[in-house]
Structure formats: C-alpha cells, structure tokens
Image (cartoon, rainbow, N blue to C red):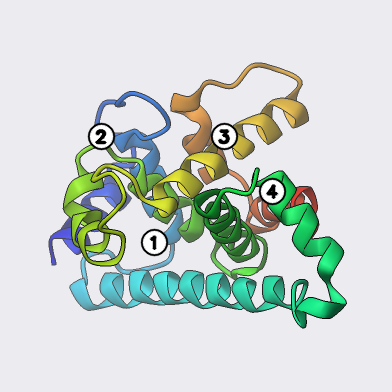
Amino acid sequence: MQFVRAAQAAAKTPKADSARSGFYSDEARNALLARLLSGVDVSSDDAVFQKLSEVTLDGVAYHELGHVKDLQRFIPIYAHIPAHFIEGFRARLSPSAIRDRTELRAESYSLAHSPEPHGVILNNLLRLEADSVKTRYIDYLLYYMPMQQADYSPYISVAGRILEFSLEYLEKESGGKVSPAETAERLSRMTPRELSQIGEAMLRDEGMK
C-alpha cells in the first residue's frame, strides 16, 4: 500500500517534492498522479488502488496488443522478407537493438491507444527514477537476462526514448526550448488525445499505424 499512500499524497500536493536530474522529478510524478486520480476519492485506499490497477492493466494490455500488431508486419517470413532486411539494417544487425525497437513500438502503441495515456507516461517516468532502477528490475535482469549488465533493461531504454521523443515533440509544437526536467509535467497538462498523438507520431517513425 506504500504506492497508494504516495499517490494519495501526490493528488493533494502535486508539487510537493524537488526535481531530480534528467526527466524524472517528484513534481512531475505527482502531477501525473494527480491527473490520473482526478475525480477519485483519494481518501479511500480501495478507490486509489482500483484506479491505479485499472490504469496499469490497460497500459499492459495495449502494450501486448502492440506486439501482436507489430508481429503482423513480419510474418509469415517468406511474405515479408524486405521488412526483415529493413529492420535488421536499422538495428545494425544487433539482436539487443532489435529487441529494444520491438519494445519501443509496443509501448508507443500503448501510448497511442490506451484510454489512459497519462498512465503510460507515468509508468515510463517511474522507470527512469534513479532509486528504482535496481530495486524494481534487478530480479528481472538476473532471471531473464543474466548476460546483460545489471543496470540495463530494455524497458528503461524504451522509457528514456519515449520521454526524449516527447520532449522533441513538445519543442516542435511550441517552437521553444523544453528541458528534460519539465517534460513530464508539461505532458501531465495535455489532454489524453494530445498524448495519444505523440504515440501515433512515434509509431509513424517506426513504420506502424
């Protein structure tokens, strides 16, 4: 229930904590949580837990659906040989790069199609929180990717790229400079449709719709 307590506090004081380096800041996290919990009785543990659970499950569901949609571009192999060559060339024939790009497309699909895109942004922002890297992913790294460096996860790499792309998108739309530290907080003020458009732009960059 620790995260529920943090969410409840964030909804009441969305700018309570000081910013950390890079994209992550407690202010941005709290602003996204406040946006997600608007209309929710934040004094109720059950209501907060239910909302955050729904948001998380929606994000995961659309991420996995993104993998299904992506796979359709590559199978059957004999009918999509050019697509395989292009993908290999763009990833410089690196298996890990191909995996990262696959995860990026799936998460971009989630951002584009999830009914709660602010939750997708929040989930990726939390992956970049410095203190969470090892505590949240060390079991995954040791179990699933024992040959990888202990501070690396494709999901952390994808989270960084999503925030970077969002920063570039905001700069293009506003015509001004946007710092990494203010990116997520600006995203929290966007409508769900506006956030979905960022995901759609990322998919177009990757050759998906």
Q: Which residue is located at x 22 percent, y 55 percent?
A: 136
Q: Nearer the viewer, residue 89 or 12?
A: 89
In this rendering, which labeled residue sits more in front, label 3 or label 1?
3
The residue closer to the viewer here, 120 or 34, is 120
Identify residue for label 3: 164
Q: In terms of image quadrants, where is residue 39?
A: bottom left
Verify CB contact (< 8 Å) between mark 4 and mark 1.
no
Tag shown at residue 16:
2
Up-down: is 114 above or below 129?
below
Image position of 14 with respect to 72: above or below: above
Q: What label does residue 37 carry, if any? A: 1
Left or right: residue 9 versus residue 186 is left
What kind of residue is marked 4?
A: Ile
Looking at the rendered image, the quarter that the C terminus falls into is: bottom right
Q: Where residue 70 is drawn, which disc sits there? A: none
Q: Earlier in the sequence, mark 2 or mark 3?
A: 2
Image quadrant where one finds the N terminus:
bottom left
Q: Nearer the viewer, residue 30 or 60?
A: 60
> At which x and y percent is residue 206?
74, 52
In the image, what residue type sits under mark 2?
A: Ala
Q: Earlier in the sequence, mark 4 or mark 1?
A: 1
Is 156 located above or below residue 85 in the figure?
Answer: above
- Tell me the residue at 46%/60% (across/down): 119
Q: Which residue is mark 4?
A: 198
Q: Residue 165 location, x and y as percent?
A: 63, 38
Q: CA distance from mark 3 to mark 1?
A: 25 Å
In this picture, residue 83 sits left or right of residue 65: right
Q: Amino acid at mark 1?
A: Leu
CA distance for labels 2 and 3: 24 Å
Q: Give the CA distance from mark 1 to mark 2.
A: 16 Å
Q: Residue at x 69, y 70 (%)?
A: 70
